[in-house]
Image (spheres, rainbow, N blue to C red):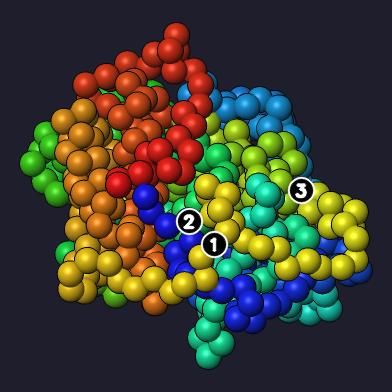
Amino acid sequence: MPHRYLVPFNPKRTPHFFTDVLVVGAGIAGLRAALAIPLSLDVLVVNKDKVQLSNSSWAQGGIATVMSPEDRFENHVEDTLTAGCGLCQRDIVEMVVREAPDQISDLIRLGTHFDEEGGQLALTREGGHSHRRIVHALGDATGFEVMRAIIQKAEETSNILLWDETFTLDLLTHDGKCVGAAVWRPNHGLLLIWAKQTILASGGAGMVYRETTNPPVATGDGMAAAYRAGAELRDMEFMQFHPTVLYVAGSSRSLISEAVRGEGAYLRDKNMDRFMLEVDPRAELAPRDVVAQAIVRQMEKTRHPNVYLDLRHLEKALVKKRFPGIDKVCRGFGLDITSDLIPIRPGAHYMIGGVTVDAQGSTTVPGLWAAGEVTSSGLHGANRLASNSLLEGLVFGALCGRGAAEAAQAVADRFTVYPLENRAGSPLSPATRGLEGEGMLDVADLTNSLRSLMVRNMGVIREEAGLAEAERDVAFWCRYVLLHEFDDRPGWELLNMLTVARLMIHSARKRTESRGVHFRSDHPARADANWSRHVACPPFGEVMDFA
């Protein structure tokens, strides 16, 4: 059976750090949580890399919020429910949607500069939205601007301590309760952080795929750590693929924002056919699952590796002003977005599934809260509506911050170093385990093999034979890799990605229907009678037991 903790340690010989609230992750959800905690409590925010390198900072499109006179909360709610294909929790959707304007006001108060038109917030429209309700900043760099303001505020707040380049190895548990985390810091080594309450906001897992819009930090570490700690994960089959990712051979896959189609761009195949007109009455403004699947089918039909975004009919000055970041990236490949066709294809973008949380952000493990992409909150259902992700991070980040603060204040003002246990409840062995098996593993080769397999067999369109092959291959890799112990980030990330991939494939095989971002060509219909429900992952030790 795989180890409960990624690395062995002896609590008596390991340095300790104590805080009232520990926040794992410094994206929009984590820092919003930290800022919601009163100054009377100490907050430690640990971040895997530089604080600017989160998925939140990479977000282009914007934040969905009802602002215009012709829009209504009910419209935003219905758009979200429609996109979610029957799996959204209406009460969660209504709560998040109604919180949105206040969250935007808070961001402005924190110093965020959103784009304006005529002294009012500028609003654009994206796929699946019935109205223009997307606020944005710096044209197409909303996440960067929002995170600039939030990071600055967090750094200025006296009770918040930020640790960059801190890898969270595992969550610490005692008697089924989360009591902190084991982390690794360069020049410090292993540290045990003891916390009265812990908030997990570690982001997504797009790096499980070879083609993704995510930054390199998105390797599913928080999901895997929560799973090893006994938290419930669900809906892991629902990885959302963004329809429009720049496809240039030899380049990294750069996101081309949904807002480009929101401003009127067309999708064309290699024959210049505007194929979305025949797929959906909303054409290019259909939800992401519809557009991504249509693109894949059109690439197969035309036997071409990509389709194209066409902005040539739009006003050049508007395009340049609205999408300066995308323009800069494309110019790096000799492409002028006002006069050239932009080659694109779908790429892994957003993990809808994750750690199960309730309406307050509580997980199934006492003492552990979670917010943002690491969670399954009930907001997105089977397909996330564009620009609802930053909104979710803000709303649930604030909820977790307030909830964790209240719980921490109820704990006596003292700290206990607990005897740590593994999943079976026996004391953790202090002995250092060495590498098991012959020779050293080629981590880079295994990582590349996994990411390529996921694109082939767990991509936009799936079927049983491919899923079964993927499960066999990943189970084989897990059988020997998960018994190894590593002493560096690439090795730990591989262990976490294998764990997450195994859960994703297991869930995809189990859901024998097509719904939202999960499309199975062998079960192409939606089956409400059997599958209008979440798919919870088996406990750690069942699906991950390869002994």
Q: Secondary structure at mark 1?
A: loop
Q: CA distance from mark 2 to mark 3?
A: 29 Å
> Could you tell me how far apart the alpha carbons at marks 2 and 1 are, in whole angstroms?
9 Å
Q: Which residue is mark 3?
A: 399
Secondary structure type for disc 3? helix
Q: Residues within 10 Å of mark 1 (few under 14, many from 20)?
A: some
Residue under circle 2?
A: 4
Q: Residue at x 13, y 37 (%)?
A: 300
User: What type is the residue that disc 3 sits on?
Assistant: Leu
Q: Is residue 422 left or right of residue 100?
A: left
Percent coordinates x, y for residue 487 in the rendering: 39, 77
Closest to the camera, between mark 2 and mark 3, is 2
Residue 126 image position (x, y, % from top left): 50, 42
Q: Seen in the image, is 166 located left or right of residue 290?
A: right
Is 351 displayed left or right of 520 in the figure?
right
Q: In front: 257, or 293?
A: 293
- Check contact, mark 2 vs mark 1: CB within 8 A: yes
Q: Residue at x 75, y 73 (%)?
A: 18
Q: Which label number is shown at residue 44?
A: none
The x, y position of residue 240, in whole percent, is 40, 42
Image point (65%, 47%), residue name: 176
For marks 3 and 1, give the CA distance.
34 Å
Question: Looking at the image, which is closer to me, 333 or 207?
Answer: 207
Q: Amino acid at mark 2?
A: Arg
List the residue tagged with mark 1: 428
Residue occupying image coordinates x 56% and y 74%: 10
Q: Secondary structure at mark 2?
A: loop
Q: Nearer the viewer, residue 435 or 246?
A: 435
Check contact, mark 3 vs mark 1: CB within 8 A: no
Counting residues from the start of the chain, the first of labels 2 and 3 encountered is: 2
Point out residue 247 in the picture as x, y percentages from the top left corner: 24, 58
